[in-house]
Image: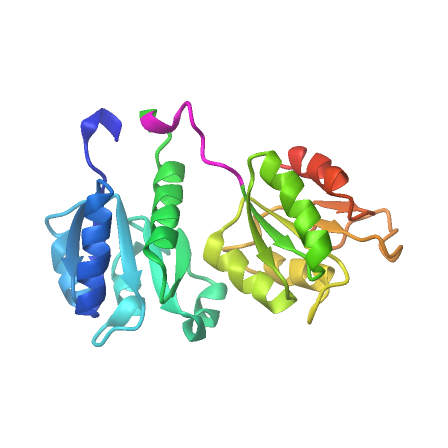
Amino acid sequence: MENGRKKTILLVDDDTSLLVTLSDFLRFEGYDVTTAESGELGLKRLQVLEPDLIILDMSMPGMGGIGFLKEISINGKLRHPVLVLTARANMAEFFADVDVDGFVAKPCAPEDLLMEVGRILFLRSGQDEERVDAPAPRKVLLGEDDAMVAAAIEAVFAEEGLLVTLVERGPDMIEQAILQRPDVIVLKQIFSKMNGDAVADMLQAMPNARTIPVILYDDSGRLKSAAPPSGVRQVVLSSDPNELLSALRSTT
């Protein structure tokens, strides 16, 4: 931690058992955690606290998560970094215009939450001396519905030190792109439930996802136009893992 100071987290959730579990876990991991059981109480905590990160549940009585976000916004910009905890059914309402730092679906494993907390704090802090010599691995969402092809690609990416999450359907890729905020998406064109170019086009329309580079690959011979489809950074006319890795290395 910079200058020996613990990072401060404000955890806002009306689930008392979850507050206890997550706060104990985060404290064990070295964070200074303050809790609030409602959005209203969270705002009171902010009168005397300047957290490095707010972890916010959206489904709470009273003002709820949406009201809390409005209260800490100035001209549409949040005054604090926010990681949203939300059930799957609540995700769609945030796709369009909520500029938070990340999403984690509930229920969540503490380890998944810890990884997302670390990612956000790392990105928010350009002077984190503990991470200078060990930069966070690049997070890759891989969209592939053939198990053998996926395993081959994952093996090559893992050797490169990439952190790979496999997604097997187009609609799930959209959701996971919002939840995980990957560094890059590597996506099959002929994909289950929704083709890759349609997924990329939808992500391009979402402020929270449009900056994620998308590499679209296709060995069917259908993608031969000079210009990549909307929202696609690169097109690779092959599913060869090494060609995909080469494209990924050139994508920032």
Residue 17 seen in this snapshot? yes
Q: Nearer the viewer, residue 26 or 7?
A: 26
Q: In this view, does 179 lie to the left or right of 80?
A: right
Colour scheme: rainbow
Image label count? 0
Q: Nearer the viewer, residue 14 or 160?
A: 160
**Rendered location of residue 208, percent (x, y):** 50, 55
Residue 38 seen in this snapshot? no
Residue at figure coordinates x 21%, y 59% from the top left:
21
The correct choice, above or below, for 69 with respect to 128 in the image is: below
**Rendered location of residue 16, percent (x, y):** 17, 68
The correct choice, above or below, for 114 with respect to 64 in the image is: above
Q: Is residue 72 left or right of residue 250?
A: left
Q: Main secondary structure of the magenta part?
A: loop
- Give the quadrant of residue 129: top left
Residue range (magenta): 130-138
Residue at figure coordinates x 60%, y 34% from the top left:
160
**Rendered location of residue 61, percent (x, y):** 22, 76
Residue 98 part of the magenta segment: no
**Rendered location of residue 126, percent (x, y):** 37, 30
